[in-house]
Image (cartoon, rainbow, N blue to C red):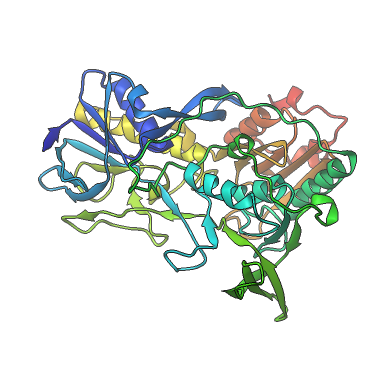
């Protein structure tokens, strides 16, 4: 069996769907084929501007049949790419001839254990893995979470009726996104919320889909979770009493030294030996381990010519999202930006950048097919990410933790307990990054300060003086 198309996009995550939708807008009459391993794909919805170039959005699950008439779909897995002759072969033996190809195959969770079928270690990545977590939680009393990113942070505080042991390699929580000051702000706020009683949650009213698979087939590669994934699941355990008022017990600067299955007849679970930074060890028991230690680029297919990869395993792409293979592009978690970044931008494998890269790849492919010139999108001038941690809105801008600035920068912080946390990173009197937690309404102001390179030295520490509304000066 064979098919033909002008544009072939591989991957049903945010990057792949964004690329397909951009192509459908730029080239409405061209044939576009989306090759996805899952019949459930992810798309961006409720796109709301937070600042001029910064957006927050929801992620919607939809069936491939809802992609629209402009995009054809095929549920299958990519197996081989022949870039010189412009065709690919799928696992089911379908040969697809294309003119332009974009790889958006995403990332796979990094599991600290290399065992392929480790029964008591779960990697959280897609909807299927969360359903498995929910199933195991129903009979669990003690759970260990390994990792310190967004999923681990939310999971540690969302699990109910279970003793949570949170193991992090850093000296503070949520180190992927925030500094120690913001981590302390979150912990104090959560503790006081627990003491006062839990606050009601906002209901998430969104269509949910299940994937129908043959009994002998198990899809391990669904698209990644949405930013509010934990609100749509009951993450409750079986423990009748839990310590420390339901808050997780955190083990800083620690790692799992070794683990083994408990003896039959002792209730099952794992005996875990934790190693600490000072060289000491600690013995713990738990029902299972949740590994949330990030993702690694996933490219489980062969090519006719060697593909160029970066040190982190991602496919190297230039500013137009082109790989080293002719007419082959890549976007999202599977790729690594190999161009010289703008002063205020760097790559993080996030939903926001998956959408931006997918759209950029679509524009680039469409322009080349028409013989036109296109320039890199302005969103790559400034790093920006909007998320929610521990119930607080969080905006990250620029080099928000002083990334790649060495030690040549200063920090200004304003914190109002349980309300807001604002951090400015300044270098040579100019704003280089910001963390905004809470309803600060400063996102657009910070965006302007960074992009315009305004000298803030004359204002000194007053730039964050709560009695001075800096929006009036710089908005």
Q: Position of residue 22 (x, y in %)?
A: 35, 26
| Of 66 and 253, the residue lying toward us | 66
| Displayed quadrant of residue 199 | top right
- Quick one: quadrant of the C terminus? top right
Residue shown at the point (49%, 42%) measured from the top left: 127
| Of 74 and 270, the residue lying toward us | 270
| Circle count | 0
Q: Position of residue 184 (x, y in %)?
A: 79, 51
Instruction: Give left or right: position of 364 versus 84.
Output: right
Residue shown at the point (47%, 28%) measured from the top left: 44
Instruction: Give left or right: position of 187 versus 56.
Output: right
- The residue lying furthest to the front in this view is 265
Q: Where is residue 133 in the image (x, y as percent from the top left)?
A: 57, 50
Instruction: Give left or right: position of 111 versus 467.
Output: left
Residue shown at the point (85%, 36%) measured from the top left: 465
| Displayed quadrant of residue 41 | top left
Q: Against 400, is 204 above or below?
A: above
Residue shown at the point (34%, 46%) measured from the top left: 318
Q: Against 470, is 149 above or below?
A: below
Q: Against 278, is 342 above or below?
A: above
Q: Against 78, is 199 above or below?
A: above
Q: Where is residue 417 in the image (x, y as percent from the top left)?
A: 86, 41
Answer yes or no: is residue 428 visible: no
Answer yes or no: is residue 474 visible: yes
């Amino acid at each position: 069996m064979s098919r033909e198309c002008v544009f072939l996009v591989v991957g049903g995550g945010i990057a792949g769907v964004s690329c397909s939708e951009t192509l459908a807008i730029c080239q409405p009459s061209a044939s576009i084929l989306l090759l996805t391993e899952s019949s459930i794909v992810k798309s961006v919805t409720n796109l709301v501007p937070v600042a001029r170039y910064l957006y927050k959005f929801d992620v919607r699950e939809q069936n491939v049949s809802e992609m629209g008439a402009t995009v054809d779909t095929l549920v299958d897995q990519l197996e081989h790419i022949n870039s010189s002759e412009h065709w690919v072969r799928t696992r089911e033996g379908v040969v697809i001839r294309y003119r332009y190809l974009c790889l958006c195959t995403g990332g796979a969770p990094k599991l600290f254990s290399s065992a392929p079928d480790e029964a008591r270690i779960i990697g959280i990545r897609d909807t299927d893995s969360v359903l498995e977590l929910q199933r195991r939680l129903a009979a669990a009393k003690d759970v260990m979470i390994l990792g310190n990113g967004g999923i681990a942070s939310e999971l540690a505080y969302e699990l109910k009726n279970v003793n949570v042991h949170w193991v992090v390699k850093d000296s503070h929580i949520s180190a992927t996104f925030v500094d120690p000051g913001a981590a302390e702000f979150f912990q104090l706020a959560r503790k006081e919320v627990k003491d006062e009683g839990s606050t009601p949650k906002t209901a998430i009213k969104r269509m949910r889909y299940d994937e129908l698979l043959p009994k002998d087939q198990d899809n391990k590669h669904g698209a990644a979770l949405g930013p509010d994934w934990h609100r749509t699941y009951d993450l409750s355990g079986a423990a009748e009493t839990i310590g420390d008022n339901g808050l997780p017990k955190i083990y800083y600067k620690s790692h799992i030294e070794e683990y083994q299955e408990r003896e039959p007849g002792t209730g099952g679970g794992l005996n875990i030996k934790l190693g600490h930074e000072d060289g000491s060890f600690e013995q713990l028991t738990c029902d299972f381990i949740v590994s949330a230690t990030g993702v690694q680029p996933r490219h489980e297919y062969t090519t006719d010519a060697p593909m160029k990869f970066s040190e982190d395993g991602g496919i190297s792409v230039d500013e137009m999202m082109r790989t080293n293979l002719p007419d082959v592009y890549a976007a999202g978690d599977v790729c690594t930006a190999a161009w010289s970044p703008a002063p205020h931008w760097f790559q993080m494998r996030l939903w926001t950048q998956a959408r931006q890269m997918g759209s950029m790849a679509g524009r680039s492919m469409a322009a080349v097919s028409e013989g036109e010139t296109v320039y890199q999108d302005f969103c790559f001038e400034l790093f920006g990410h909007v998320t929610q941690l521990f119930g607080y809105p969080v905006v990250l801008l620029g080099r928000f933790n002083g990334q790649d600035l060495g030690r040549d920068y200063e920090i200004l912080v304003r914190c109002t307990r349980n309300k807001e946390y604002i951090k400015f990173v300044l270098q040579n009197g100019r704003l280089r990054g910001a963390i905004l937690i809470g309803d600060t309404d400063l996102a657009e102001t910070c965006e302007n300060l960074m992009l315009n390179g305004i000298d803030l030295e004359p204002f000194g520490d007053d730039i964050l003086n709560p009695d001075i509304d800096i929006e009036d000066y710089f908005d």
